[in-house]
Image: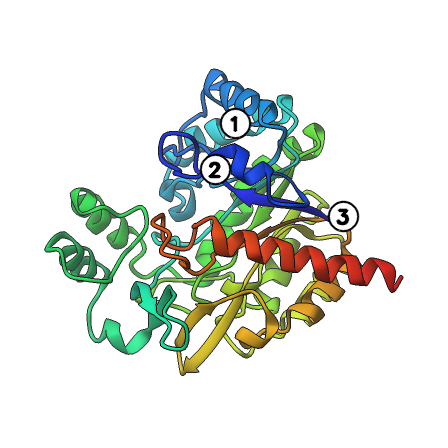
């Protein structure tokens, strides 16, 4: 297991790399460049990022958010040029030692919450929160409009109000599209990309839908074990893997996370993991919790045990944390609670190692 940490880059992440280096047991980043979907990543920019990270004493073997362009997901003729760019980026990242690329194939929305800073009454910290009832009858356009009007809470990552017109067009392209249609376009993408990954020693790792159920009537095809069985079968290869995000899949209590890890881990289809805890508050209603098992509804010991037994060489990062100790930062991505999470997961790992 390699313990890593997400970092947004010097320009927008308030956490200095040296702080990350000082978290015990963290060997590297799950890094990213904030680029629009479909863009061929410039090699000089990535090389500069890698140099900076390496000079701080950290590795950068996992990259998140090489985003798949909507034209690929909707199967438009323009998809081929975006796939070409994707392949070019895969080759470039491989030249710089990247081993895993985390991405998703979710229509339009990356993840959705109804409150980014819901106070946890028990201890006064806050965390990301979702209650489907708060969405009411609102559709995605209304939510973005509300965000534009400065209403509290709603956020659709990647859909800033100034891109509203584009959002409207994109949503229209999904009208009438079924899960099977989306999977057909997904297979077309994987058939083009996975062979290149195999040749270059890179693994693609698909991130689950978050929350783990359909929203806004869009086809969502990545939120259960059965869904991921179909995804890994679309193009059967050790390079076509799952980014097993415990909090995303775990937002649905029907998903047995340790069993899902054992299933895909023993198939060698887990490329990377995001590990966090969730507290269930009702139907389609949850908040994110501290990593410790007793603080939420997932059993982190059982989760780490399943990793230890079936995919012990995987990359892990502590996923979203709470905001604690009055830290100001990006919701979910503060330093303190994620560092506590890493320390706790490393502790569980040491115990598992010593128990053989
Ligand atoms: Mn995740």
Please tell me which residue is depicted at 46% across the width and 27% down the height of the picture.
Answer: 85
Q: Which image quarter holds the C terminus?
A: bottom right
- Are dots 1 and 3 in contact, CB under 8 Å? no
Q: In the rendered image of this protein, does residue 253 appear above or below residue 301? A: below
Q: Which mark is residue 313?
A: 3
- Nearest-to-viewer mark from 2 and 3: 3
Residue 151 seen from this side: yes
Q: What mark, if any, has residue 176 been given in the picture?
A: none
The image quadrant that residue 284 belongs to is bottom left
Q: Earlier in the sequence, mark 1 or mark 3?
A: 1
Q: Quadrant of residue 181?
A: bottom left
Q: CA distance from mark 2 to mark 3?
A: 23 Å
Q: Residue 293 or 179: which is nearer the viewer?
A: 293
Q: Residue 334: x and y, percent?
A: 43, 50
Q: Find numbered disc 3 in the image and state the secondary structure of the residue it sits on.
A: loop
10 Å crowding of disc 3: few (<14), some (14-19), many (20+): few
Question: Would residue 153 appear left or right of 19 to someone viewing this image?
Answer: left
- Mark 2 sits on what residue? 66
Q: Nearer the viewer, residue 271 or 331?
A: 331
- Given contact means CB atoms under 8 Å apart, are the residues at marks 2 and 3 in contact? no
Rendering coords of residue 34 (x, y %):
39, 34
Q: Secondary structure at mark 2?
A: loop
């Amino acid at each position: 297991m390699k313990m890593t940490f997400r970092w947004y880059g010097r320009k927008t992440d308030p956490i200095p790399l040296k702080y990350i280096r000082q978290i015990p047991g963290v060997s590297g980043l799950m890094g990213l460049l904030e680029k629009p979907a479909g863009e061929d990543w410039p090699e000089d920019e990535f090389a500069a990022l890698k140099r900076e990270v390496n000079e701080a004493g950290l590795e950068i073997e996992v990259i998140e958010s090489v985003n798949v362009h909507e034209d690929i997901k909707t199967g438009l003729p323009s998809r081929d040029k975006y796939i070409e760019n994707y392949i070019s980026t895969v080759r470039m990242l491989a030249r710089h030692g990247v081993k895993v690329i985390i991405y998703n194939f979710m229509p339009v929305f990356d993840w959705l919450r109804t409150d980014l800073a819901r106070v946890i009454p028990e201890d006064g910290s806050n965390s990301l929160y979702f209650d489907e009832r708060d969405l009411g009858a609102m559709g995605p356009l209304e939510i973005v409009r509300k965000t534009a009007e400065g209403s509290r809470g709603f956020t659709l990552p990647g859909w800033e109000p100034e891109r509203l017109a584009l959002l409207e067009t994109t949503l229209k392209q999904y009208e009438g599209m079924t899960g099977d249609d989306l999977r057909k376009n997904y297979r077309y993408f994987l058939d083009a990309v996975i062979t290149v990954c195999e040749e270059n020693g890179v693994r693609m790792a698909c991130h689950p839908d978050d929350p783990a159920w359909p929203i806004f009537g869009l086809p969502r095809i990545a939120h259960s074990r059965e869904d991921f069985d179909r995804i890994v079968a679309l193009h059967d290869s050790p390079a076509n893997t799952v980014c097993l995000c415990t909090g995303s899949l775990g937002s649905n209590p029907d998903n047995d996370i340790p069993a899902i890890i054992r299933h895909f881990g023993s198939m060698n289809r887990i490329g990377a993991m995001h590990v966090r805890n969730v507290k269930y508050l009702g139907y389609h209603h949850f908040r994110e919790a501290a990593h410790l098992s007793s603080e939420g509804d997932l059993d982190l010991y059982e989760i780490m045990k399943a990793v230890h037994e079936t995919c012990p060489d995987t990359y892990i990062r502590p996923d979203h944390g709470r905001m604690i100790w009055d830290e100001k930062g990006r919701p979910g991505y503060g330093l303190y609670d994620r560092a506590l999470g890493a320390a706790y997961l490393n502790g569980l790992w040491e115990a598992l190692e010593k128990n053989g």
